[in-house]
Image (tube, grey):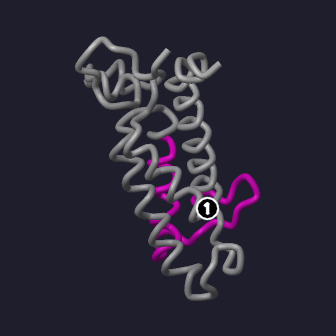
Amino acid sequence: MLIRLNQAQPYVLSLFRFVVGLLFAFHGAATLFGVLGGNQAETGAWPGWYAALIQLVCGSLVALGLGTRAAAFLASGSMAYAYFKVHQPEALLPLQNGGEGAAMFCWAFLLLVFTGPGSIALDRFFGSRNTAADTGGAPRRDKTPAVPV
């Protein structure tokens, strides 16, 4: 069972990346264009309009697996900023201040910075041929199994 789970890890990581990126992009689109039930931010308004632009662009890039680590780093930072500037002054904990979404997105994107895009990503086809980018893990230097059988 554990072997099958480990074999599926790069594919599940790709699915995780796609879903998180898509949700983030939808959040940005809702704020930028007033669609999907969102309130439209005034063009150029700080920080809402710029945050929505980051959400749409970085979320789309992460969902596609294109420049995943850089886009996830920027997205994670924007959510950390949102949490500490908007939510945290209201109360200490995310459940008390309405910042659960910002905290979850921040940590999910930070995870993708370190894991990479998984095995199904456009990064794999454009440019990077590094094992780390292809599989979402550190490059393997030997042929021994990662998990004892």
Q: Residue at x 44, y 40 (%)?
A: 61
Quadrant of the rendering where the N terminus is positioned: top right
Q: Position of residue 138 (x, y in %)?
A: 31, 31
Instruction: Kindly identify which residue carries mark 1.
Output: 31
Q: Quadrant of residue 144?
A: top left
Q: Residue at x 48, y 32 (%)?
A: 64
Q: Position of residue 112 (x, y in %)?
A: 44, 43
Residue ranking furthest to the front = 148
| Rendered view: 79 above or below 114 | below
Q: Is residue 40 magenta?
A: yes
Q: Is residue 131 magenta?
A: no
Q: Position of residue 77 (x, y in %)?
A: 41, 62
Q: Toward the viewer: 70 or 27?
A: 70
Kindly identify the amino acid type of the residue bearing the numbered disc 1.
Answer: Thr
Q: Toward the viewer: 101 or 132?
A: 132
Q: Quadrant of residue 3?
A: top right
Q: Residue at x 49, y 64 (%)?
A: 79
First to last magenta residue range: 32-60
Q: Is residue 144 left or right of residue 24?
A: left
